[in-house]
Image (tube, rainbow, N blue to C red):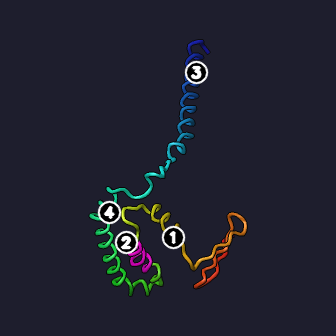
Amino acid sequence: MTAQANTKCTAKYKLLTVLISASLTFASMQPALAAIEIDETDFGPSYETMAVDTVVGKPLQLIAAVAGTAAYIVSLPFSLIGGNADQAQQKLFVEPWNAMSRCLGCTVAEDNYYKSQIVDSNVVRIVVDQPSEIIINTNDYVVVRP
């Protein structure tokens, strides 16, 4: 091998090493770039999101819920034959109407957070061993979460 050919191979290996190192560096940075820091002072819906949800979001959700109800009624004979009437009811009827109960301007995560903060006087929580807990709903049933 000549010195010139040896230099070309070394240059190729150096370039390949730099590219692989850069790729690994960028790949390891992706989770850090995906993290979102929540500013608790700005948590929750803003004026803009509430206004847009009032004018656009809720009317569209109402249309979707009514259309889903109509689709459920039309599909009911077929879903009964197919044995999936419960799934059709959940997707076409229950979920669209449940979406209407989301707080105004809230994302799904914000709505879940606000609903989790509501105190239910019928529920007794007993923390057994973190993170296990026993939830007793005094109206209905007992749930044990391991």
Amino acid type, mark 2 = Met
Verify whether residue 92 appears in magenta: yes
Give the residues in magenta.
Answer: 88-100
Q: Nearer the viewer, mark 1 or mark 4?
A: 1
Observer-side mark, 2 or 1, equals: 1
Badge 4 or badge 2: first in the primary sequence: 4
Q: Amino acid at mark 3?
A: Cys
Residue 118 badge: 1
Q: Nearer the viewer, residue 35 or 44?
A: 44
Q: Secondary structure at mark 4?
A: helix
Residue 50 vs residue 26, the one in the foreground: 50
Please identify the dominant SS of the magenta region. Answer: helix
Residue pictured at 37% horizontal, 81% vertical: 72
Q: Is residue 120 magenta?
A: no
Residue designated by label 4: 53
Q: Quadrant of the N terminus?
A: top right
